[in-house]
Structure formats: structure tokens, C-alpha cells
Image (tube, rainbow, N blue to C red):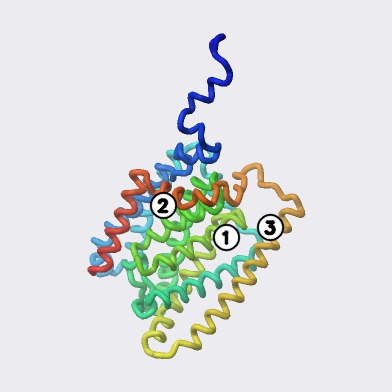
Amino acid sequence: MEPNQTPEAAPAKQGFLSRFTPKQQDFLRGKHAVSNSATVLVLIIYALLLLSRLIDAAFLSRESQYLSIILLQLMIFPIPTYLYVRMQGGDYVKSLRLKKIKLSHLFLLLSASLMLITGCTLLAMLCGMMNAQPSFTLYDTFASANDGSVGATVRLVLAYGLLPAFCEELVFRGILCAEHEKHGILYAAAVSSVFFAFLHFDLTALPVYLFAGTLLAVVTYVTRSAIAAMVVHLCYNLFGIFVQAGLSGYCKSTGSIGLLVVLLVALLLLSSAFFCGEVARILRRRAQANLLDDPEEISTPGLNRIPLRQWPRALLTAFASPAGVAAVVLWLFGVVVNLVR
């Protein structure tokens, strides 16, 4: 500062921003926007998934169907993700919360799995999806098939259950949540859930995947482990593989599904109550024992660091980067392709 400059003159240089509070200034500077690099990764995955539909018929006509689907998923998810993580360098892997599951979280995972299955099934029925899905499909492209043999069942679980759960949670509850959680858990869960819902290119199923993404994000932060979300996701996929076709057939063949709806609602309420109780128990125990984060892992963020009145604009800003806009355009393109198929 020059000798003849008064301290009061410095704030005047902020100009327009000086009229706002510090939090509002952070928002206007774009500090709530989605990380461009993370959005580029999502954009690449969207593009590769859309391209995979062009070779759908060729893969399904081969005897090595499961191997083809596994290799395709490796090219779409783990390879770009691995390159992204390597580009971040340093201790970036620690921020992904790839921690082993604690035995004390078992009941939380079981209740979350039942809550996910019943909630998504009810939403699917409301959206009219159950009658349209005679079998479990992977990204609405590859239909599951099983001849009943042990080998085919193992390959089916690996290709349609385990690998999708690992890949999707690594990207959406691992990388995306880690990139945006500095603005709070709610913001990270909202952004990652929207991108996760867009992954399936299905406008009708959007509420289903938004619900699933939000619940999986809660599981991740309560357990401090993305692997826990992978386990819950796997349970849902197994339900889809082995049970969903039967429910779809039941909904299609009968005009009365009242008993099924009542059962699903009861199970949803029961699992939700149990899940909330387990969440409260874990958080209360953590607070009473003063259990701090492991020094080797990233600290748990706060619930919300954005004023509520800024949420609508913040969520719009989250998708305003060039890669974000391109991802939304690809999603719309995929939706149109689904409608005209």
C-alpha cells in the first residue's frame, strides 16, 4: 500500500462484489460450479455408452456374450477412470473413500438394500416401467439371459451385477462426490445423483435413478465408504437379475396389483424406519466416542455449505460448464434415441 493510500480505499477496488456477503461473493465467482475435469470424465462415459449401442447386435449374436459385455464395461468405465485418477496425482485415491466395510454397518446395508429395492420398484411401477421390462437390462442395451447352469449364473452376476455396481459407484459416489463435497454433503449428493440418473438415458426412469443415487450417496457418507454403496448397489442389481423379470410378468399378466403395492409400501416403510434408526445410531456413537476421521483419509464434509436461497442457481451453475452442457446434450440425444427405437 502506498503511503498516501488510506486503508478505507482498498475495499472499494472490489467494486460490484463488495455489495454482497462473502458467501454470495463465492457463488458469483463460480466456486459452486462442477469441476470441469470430473465433468469431462462423465461426458466421455456418456459418449462411450451411446457408442456401445451401435455394436449391440454384434455382441449379442456371439457366443462370448458375457465376455464381450465385461470388456465393453472395462473400456467405458475403469479405463477412463484410471487415467483420470492418474492425472490427478498425489493422494487423490484417498478422497474416493475406498475403505473396507465395518461389521457394525451390516444392518445399515441390509436396510438400505431393501429400501432401494422397494423404493425403486414402486417408482418404476408409478412411471409405467414394470410392464415394459420383461428382463433385466444393462443400460437398456444388453438383455440378461441365463440357461440355469452354474457357470452362466456366475458370469451373469459378474457382467450384470458386480461390475456395473463397482464401476458406477467408483465414478458417481467416489469421484463426483469427492469433487463437490467441499460445498457440503447435500450438494455433492444432488449433483452426483443427477449425473447418475442421466447415465441411463431414460426420461421415464429419471425419478427412479435420482432416488437411487441419493440413497447411495447417503450410504457412502454415513459409512464413510464408497464400497458400502457398491454392496447396496450390487444387492439391487441381483434383485433386478433374478426377481425383476418375475415382477414384470406379474404386473403384465394381472390387472390387480393392489396386494403387491401394499406389500412393497409396507416393506419400504419398515426398511426406511430401520435405515434411519441405523443412521442415527452410527452418528450418535461416532459423536459420543469422539471418533475422528482416520488421518489417512479425507475428512467428512458438513451437511450444507450453500445458503438455501442459492440452491436453484447453484445447481444450474453446476451444469453450465462446456463439458456439463455437452453431457446434458448427449443425455437428451440418448433419450430421443430411446424414444424412436
**Kind of residue indicated by mark 3:** Leu
Q: Secondary structure at mark 3?
A: helix
Q: Which residue is mark 2?
A: 78
Which mark is first along the chain, 3 or 2? Answer: 2
**Label 2: few (<14), some (14–19) or many (≥20) C-alpha neighbours in 10 Å:** some
Q: Nearer the viewer, mark 2 or mark 3?
A: 3
Q: Nearer the viewer, residue 294 or 191?
A: 191
Residue 226 at x, y percent in the picture: 54, 55
Q: CA distance from mark 1 to mark 3?
A: 12 Å
Look at the image and tell me in which quarter the N terminus lies.
top right
Q: Which residue is mark 3?
A: 283
Give the vertical position of 341 relative to 187 (above or below).
Answer: below
Residue 127 at x, y percent in the picture: 39, 74
Q: Are marks 2 and 3 in contact (CB under 8 Å)?
A: no
- For residue 205, side relative to residue 59 (left or right): right
Residue 209 at x, y percent in the picture: 44, 65
What residue occupies the far top of the structure in this picture?
3
Q: Residue at x 40, y 73 (%)?
A: 152
Q: How many marks?
A: 3
Q: Which residue is mark 1?
A: 219
**Kind of residue indicated by mark 1:** Val
Q: Nearer the viewer, residue 240 or 118?
A: 118
Q: Residue at x 48, y 55 (%)?
A: 190
**Label 1: few (<14), some (14–19) or many (≥20) C-alpha neighbours in 10 Å:** many
Look at the image and tell me in which quarter the C terminus lies.
bottom left
Residue 311 at x, y percent in the picture: 49, 51
Give the vertical position of 281 relative to 304 (above or below).
Answer: below
Which mark is first along the chain, 1 or 2? Answer: 2
Q: Are marks 2 and 1 in contact (CB under 8 Å)?
A: no
Q: Secondary structure at mark 2?
A: helix
Q: Residue at x 45, y 79 (%)?
A: 243
Which mark is first along the chain, 3 or 1? Answer: 1
